[in-house]
Image (cartoon, helix red, strand yellow):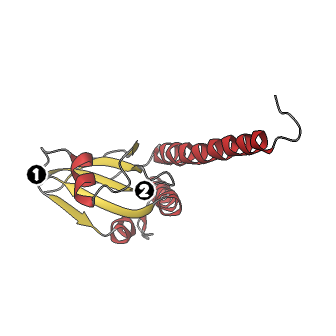
Amino acid sequence: MLIYGHRSNLKSIKFRKKNFMAKQKINDVLQNLKLASRGAVYVSETDSTPEAFRRSVRADATTEYIKRKLTGTDHGPIEEVDANDFFERITAKKDWHNDREETNRRRWEKLYRILTENLTELRVLKAGTIQIEIIVYGRDGDGAICGIRMKAVET
């Protein structure tokens, strides 16, 4: 119950609303990644669909700690590639694209836009040698690690 004249009650209500809205935005980022991932296919020697994820980490977590947390220890070498270069290859328009390939390209454009508009410190990791796990991640507004991951085979 709000008692008129008590500003502390009003401040409390405003804080809860602001906190709720911040959590809602974070959930929206993950939900948008999940929705945009539907139907997108990462084409390699084996095709794979991206899977959206979110992991909480300490604000002062190092890049090396985050890499280990995301890839585990059994993947072998971890290569970091430039996010712009990675997405440029997937989202480039080609004259020879058929309708299915063009639809897939547009899905990847949308995913890239969601990632770049909502995450900071965007990175792409390739873990492994032949059977590779590709992880695209950044920090969301809450400082958690959020992104997409998929499998690939590269020989």
For label 2, the SS is strand
Camera-side mark, 2 or 1: 2
Q: Residue at x 49, y 51 (%)?
A: 142
Horizontally, is 100 left or right of 44 in the view?
right
Question: Residue at the top extreme?
Answer: 1
| Badge 1: residue crowd in 10 Å (few <14, some 14–19, many ≥20) | few
For label 1, the SS is loop
Q: Amino acid at mark 2?
A: Arg
Q: Nearer the viewer, residue 122 or 104?
A: 122
Mark 2 or mark 1, earlier in chain:
1
Please indicate, yes or no, whether residue 57 appears anywhere in the rendered image.
yes
Q: Disc number at residue 139?
A: 2
Please indicate, yes or no, whether residue 44 appears anywhere in the rendered image.
no
Q: Nearer the viewer, residue 38 or 84?
A: 84
Residue under pointer 1 = 76
The Cα–Cα distance between marks 2 and 1, rounded to whole angstroms, is 24 Å
Q: Nearer the viewer, residue 82 or 109?
A: 82
The answer to whether mark 2 and mark 1 are in CB contact below 8 A is no
The quadrant of the image that shows the N terminus is top right
Residue 5 spot, x, y in % from top left? 88, 41
Residue 69 spot, x, y in % from top left? 25, 46
| Badge 2: residue crowd in 10 Å (few <14, some 14–19, many ≥20) | many
Q: Residue at x 45, y 57 (%)?
A: 108
Residue 76 spot, x, y in % from top left? 10, 51
